[in-house]
């Protein structure tokens, strides 16, 4: 069970240590009715619930643990445009050029929606604009530059190229050959943002039930979503549990389980440094990611720590000596931080699809699902909530655009995990080229 293996790491999260959570909401008990039942208290579920409540729907939200317990409260905090290199390629292969541009524009709107939600609901989540994508060698720099040019020409989204002679002025590391800067993407404290969305949803009269895992859905014209101690009778269901829905997926939505795969990603955070030292590490305090297939990502926090993530794992087991491994990866990029202790190390699972494009759709006429964000969920999951709310309210064009993306199941059956672990080692070797 994915979630059971993460509890210890969750307790050592910098994000959890730097927030004051409100008291837990009551668990669902007995039978209630609502227009919409949302399953999942992360970005997608909370955003859908908020959008629907603002449109006049009565909404009940079921969260198996606490709001933001999963990827929405533990991710790297990077809010990015687009769908990633592979996801964008899948969209371009499957859709027309005009529809691929509409999909891209949805991702741009996702960034705008994120900023608008922060401003409208006064969410104090340490937002900083700016994002760097960094290539580690000349071959990967060529691929990155080609991608930036395609984004500019096909989608009218300009990016600033950073040549080999300039990159040292952007990042205090000798690891990188060159890069691309995006002023519209950015970063934030993901758990603060998630808790802010929950507060906004509650203020809009969304009923949130924590410690209330959905264990079954009786489908039909009037679905009923059941927990151990209660049930929600409704007109529509939105499934936004992602990999954590898989814990009960064989009963809730078995057809969704093989469409995504949990990928472990892990983060280390240093002790605070003085502001000048932090400012010298990354120009404009932008978030950053490299272009490796097994990538590193990092950013500075509001209290002048370096937050460094990466080391994806396709195994359900948490790696041994995780703190030591993550520290080694961090020092390979920033060896000048060797004197700083790193008191926090944590991680968890994100959901990926085989083609790394998002997976949205319907089960029947009134059960919707949002999953497969593949590392781009901070902005896109919030936008997904808006799209599914539009669809329930009768305007399905944008939801259906992304729902047209075809997905294959992950192969392997019982050999699924071992095969993917071998695949990860293959891609790690490719990163060395």
Image: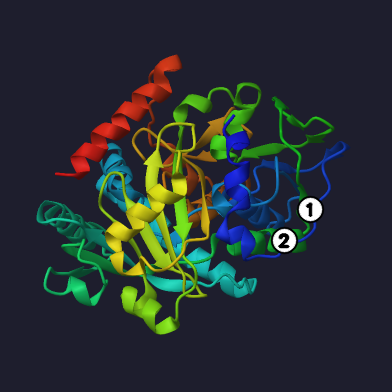
Farthest right residue in view: 30
Label 1, residues with CA under 10 Å away: few <14, some 14-19, many ≥20: few
Question: Residue 163 is drawn in which quadrant?
Answer: bottom left
- Assess whether mark 2 and mark 1 are in contact (beta carbons under 8 angstroms): yes
Give how far apart the Cα atoms at labels 1 and 2 are. 8 Å
Q: Where is residue 88 in the image (x, y as percent from the top left)?
A: 30, 47
Which residue is disc 1 drawn over?
24
Please identify the quadrant where the C terminus is shown.
Answer: top left
Farthest front residue in view: 339
Q: Is residue 104 left or right of residue 196?
A: left
Callout 1: helix, strand or loop? loop
- Residue depicted at 49% across the width and 68% down the height: 271
Which residue is disc 2 drawn over?
21
Label 2, residues with CA under 10 Å away: few <14, some 14-19, many ≥20: few
Q: Position of residue 161 (x, y in %)?
A: 19, 69
Circle count: 2
Judge by depth and name the residue closer to the eye, 270 or 77: 270
Q: Is residue 142 above or below residue 281?
A: above
- Residue depicted at 45% across the width and 73% down the height: 128
């Amino acid at each position: 069970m994915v979630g059971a293996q993460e509890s210890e790491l969750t307790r050592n999260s910098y994000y959890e240590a730097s927030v004051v959570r409100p008291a837990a909401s009551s668990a669902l008990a007995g039978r209630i009715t609502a227009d919409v039942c949302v399953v999942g208290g992360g970005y997608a579920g909370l955003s859908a619930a908020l959008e629907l409540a603002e449109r006049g729907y009565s909404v009940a939200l079921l969260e198996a643990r606490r709001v933001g317990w999963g990827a929405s409260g533990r991710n790297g905090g990077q809010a990015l445009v687009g769908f990633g290199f592979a996801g964008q390629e899948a969209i371009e292969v499957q859709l027309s050029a005009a529809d691929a541009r509409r999909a891209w524009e949805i991702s741009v709107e996702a960034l705008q929606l994120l900023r608008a939600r922060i401003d409208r609901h006064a969410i104090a989540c340490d937002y900083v604009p700016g994002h760097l994508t960094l290539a580690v060698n000349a071959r990967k720099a060529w691929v990155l530059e080609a991608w930036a040019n395609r984004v500019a020409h096909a989608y009218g989204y300009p990016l600033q190229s950073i040549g080999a002679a300039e990159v040292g002025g952007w990042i205090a590391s000798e690891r990188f050959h060159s890069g691309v800067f995006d002023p519209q993407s950015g970063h934030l404290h993901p758990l603060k943002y998630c808790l802010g969305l929950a507060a906004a949803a509650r203020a809009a009269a969304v009923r949130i039930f924590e410690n209330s895992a959905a264990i079954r859905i009786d489908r039909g014209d009037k679905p009923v979503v059941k927990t151990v101690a209660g049930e929600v009778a409704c007109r529509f269901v939105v499934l936004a549990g992602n990999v954590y829905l898989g814990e009960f997926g064989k009963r809730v939505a078995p057809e969704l389980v093989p469409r995504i795969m949990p990928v472990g990603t892990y983060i280390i955070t240093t002790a605070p440094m003085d502001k000048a030292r932090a400012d010298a590490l990354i120009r404009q305090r932008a978030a950053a990611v490299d272009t490796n297939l097994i990538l590193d990502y990092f950013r500075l926090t509001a209290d002048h720590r370096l937050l460094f993530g990466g080391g994806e794992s396709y195994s359900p087991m948490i790696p041994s000596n995780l703190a030591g491994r993550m520290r080694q990866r961090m020092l390979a990029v920033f060896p000048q931080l060797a004197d700083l202790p790193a008191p926090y190390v944590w991680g968890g699972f994100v959901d990926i699809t085989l083609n790394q494009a998002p997976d949205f759709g319907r089960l029947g006429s009134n059960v919707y699902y949002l999953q497969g964000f593949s590392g781009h969920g901070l902005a896109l999951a919030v936008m997904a909530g808006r799209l599914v709310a539009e669809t329930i309210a009768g305007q399905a064009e944008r939801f259906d655009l992304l729902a047209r993306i075809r997905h294959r199941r992950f192969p392997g059956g019982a050999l699924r995990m071992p095969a993917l672990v071998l695949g990860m080692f293959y891609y790690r070797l490719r990163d060395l080229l």
